């Protein structure tokens, strides 16, 4: 993988008819590499966001429909500011969207980013299903 310095220096260092094409290729590789890293980082962020039980509870509430901050704060023994901080984390990873109506903000669930989590869990579900099936067969043969 070319380094950032290679991508910057390539157009100046190379001469001839292929210099422009080489620079474009290097730049595309750099963009693809950067985009790939960003994609993986955002997937990690979703896992970190849902690791907190309060944020998972907020997502459960939002799965029932759009709510304001005060409605979301009711079941928790925390300040509106603390709930707003949780909502910011969820919004930053794309799990929550907001809209403003006058002076109040309303939040709604955007479950799309949970696909990464679902795919990860599905992999392990298949693993454990196979292990449990094997255990069941073993117990049938060895009562």
Image: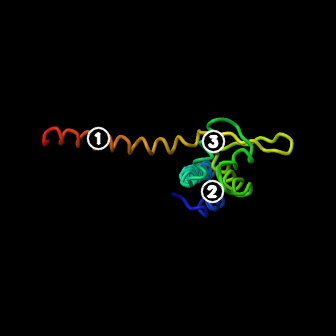
Give the CA separation, mark 2 to mark 1: 59 Å
Give the CA separation, mark 1 to mark 3: 34 Å
- Of mark 2 and mark 3, the one earlier in the sequence is 2
Q: Please tell me which residue is depicted at 65% across the width and 57% down the height of the picture.
A: 11
- Assign a secondary structure to mark 1: helix
Q: Please tell me which residue is depicted at 68% across the width and 50% down the height of the picture.
A: 87
Q: Please tell me which residue is depicted at 40% across the width and 43% down the height of the picture.
A: 123
138 sits to left or right of 60? left
Q: Which residue is mark 2?
A: 15
> Residue 14 at what x, y percent from top left?
61, 58
> Residue 8 at what x, y percent from top left?
64, 60
Query: In the rendered view, how is the structure colored?
Result: rainbow
- Density class for disc 3 (Cα within 10 Å; few <14, some 14-19, many ≥20) is some
Extreme right residue here?
102
Q: Which residue is mark 1?
A: 130
**Residue 97: which disc?**
none
**Residue 61: which disc?**
3
- Of mark 1 and mark 3, the one earlier in the sequence is 3
- Density class for disc 2 (Cα within 10 Å; few <14, some 14-19, many ≥20) is few
Give the CA separation, mark 2 to mark 3: 61 Å
- Assign a secondary structure to mark 3: helix
């Amino acid at each position: 993988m070319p380094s950032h310095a290679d991508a910057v220096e390539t157009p100046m260092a190379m001469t001839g008819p292929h210099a422009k094409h080489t620079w474009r290729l290097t730049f595309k590789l750099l963009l693809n590499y950067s985009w790939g890293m960003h994609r993986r980082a955002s997937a990690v962020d979703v896992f970190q966001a849902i690791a907190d039980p309060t944020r998972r509870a907020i997502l459960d509430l939002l799965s029932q429909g759009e709510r304001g901050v005060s409605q979301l704060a009711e079941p928790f023994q925390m300040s509106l500011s603390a709930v707003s901080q949780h909502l910011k984390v969820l919004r930053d990873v794309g799990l929550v969207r907001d809209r403003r109506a006058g002076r109040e903000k309303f939040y709604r669930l955007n479950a799309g980013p949970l696909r990464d989590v679902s795919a990860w869990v599905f992999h392990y579900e298949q693993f454990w299903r196979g292990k449990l099936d094997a255990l069941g067969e073993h117990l049938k043969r060895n009562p």
